[in-house]
Image: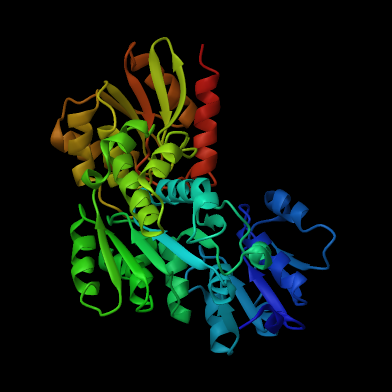
Amino acid sequence: MNRNYLSGRKVLVMGLGRFGGGVDAAKFAFSSGAKVKVTDISSGDKLGESLDELKGLAIEYRLGSHEKQDFLDADIVVVNPAVPPENEFVVIARDNSKIVTSAMNIFFQLCLARIIGITGSNGKSTTTALTGHILTRCAARSTQYANVWIGGNIGNMPLLQRLEDIGADDLVVLELSSFQLENLAQIKKSAFCALITNLSPNHLDRHGTFENYCATKENLFHYQSMSCVSIFNAEDKICCDWFDKYSREQGRVCIKYHPDMVSEKIKKKFPLPGRANLSNLAAAVTIARYFGVKEELVSEAVQDFKGLPHRLEFVREVNGVRWYNDSIATTPESVMVALDAFEEGKILIAGGYDKKIAFDNLGERIVQLSKAVVLIGQTAGQIADSIKKANADFSIHLCKSLAEAVNVAGGIARSGDIVLLSPACASYDMFDNFQQRGEQFRSLVNQLK
């Protein structure tokens, strides 16, 4: 396959979105000579920034709705990963023998470089960014690769538009979501180097069961070739089971990683808090070692890694209280990890969109690891119930907005405490996405007197 296969064909981009994926696909298809149409159920005023990026290009638009005829007229439908495969319009396209694909699928089919694919339930964004940081810092002194590109679900780079710049001697580090892996399974493609951080229930509103979710994640390893490398977290039981399974295949290199495998010299220079971040560090160091990066170079690289926004991000200290933004935490397990990262007294702000995930264990851990909880969103009642089962007298505060929650948490906190936004839920009941939620939290904290 090469990009010329798009030339002269009718390409329908389903889901422009506001974070670059639809824009990347539309620009790539247009530059490849396709006749491009974009369809999105959001109205034009909600897609302003994305539409601005496509100004001047001869692209048609269907905004505010999808129409069956657009899918019947198209030769190729490029679907946003957030759109489930059973969507009625995707089914129409498939039933009428249209090529249904995604931007990530196209990238995997056309990319000449070796791809490092990183997935998992928690820590995959930080691990991706840290791996890319280490490999980039060390590229000039490497004989095993030339340049490093970072993208995927982490959203750092318009992958398709940079395809011509990515050489065969380069490395591409990608964060891959379960939705993207679900699509990649359709073309039976995967990464040269695959790593999984851990597995816990997530996106059950999409996948139905934890078993289905895990099976989707396993696609990253299932479709690797035999000359590849597969890396698993030694502290996760399912990951260890997969290590045992795939290490029996001849020709495949299988590696387990653990924080204890990282030298004390590197750990001391690593600036991010918590054991979970040490696991992310171990994952990134394991990849770097595989690609020949020396210990002293890794040590130099990790010390200036700044972490990512909305991931245990320190916002500000006010009157001796330190405020942290962990808006990316959309599962109970990720909240438990965040609470474990600090020794200080913690006031937790949690709650949000209901992804049909149980909160039973979370309630017990909140009681054990925090002083009080402030709850918002659709799941506030469910989380409160789980806490009451563990301790009926625990300090629970229900709020109608994030602004109210910040004010209440600020009133509870005392000097030396930490206030932590770590929602355990997606954001779609009150916000467009976790980024908007985190940015509003940051703004509210910065307004505190």
Considering depth in this image, is 305 or 294 the residue closer to the camera?
A: 294
- Numbered circles on residues, count: 0
Quick check: 393 above or below 10? Answer: above
**Residue 193 at x, y percent in the picture:** 40, 65
Quick check: 412 above or below 169? Answer: above
Considering depth in this image, is 62 or 132 the residue closer to the camera?
A: 132
Instruction: Look at 29% across and 24% down and name the residue there.
Output: 346
**Residue 81 at x, y percent in the picture:** 51, 65
Instruction: Look at 28% across and 56% down and name the residue there.
Output: 201
Q: Is residue 394 left or right of residue 315?
A: left
The colour scheme used to paint the residues is: rainbow
**Residue 161 at x, y percent in the picture:** 68, 63
Q: Is residue 350 left or right of residue 304?
A: left
Q: Is residue 33 left or right of residue 439?
A: right
Instruction: Look at 52% across and 80% down and name the residue there.
Output: 91
Quick check: 411 above or below 156? Answer: above
User: Which quarter of the figure has residue 207?
Assistant: bottom left
**Residue 71 at x, y percent in the picture:** 65, 79
Quarter of the image for the N terminus: give it: bottom right
Q: Is residue 25 left or right of residue 139?
A: right
Q: In the rendered image, is residue 34 in sight?
A: yes
Quick check: 85 above or below 360? Answer: below
Instruction: Look at 48% across and 66% down and name the residue there.
Output: 115
Q: In the rendered image, is residue 381 in sight?
A: no
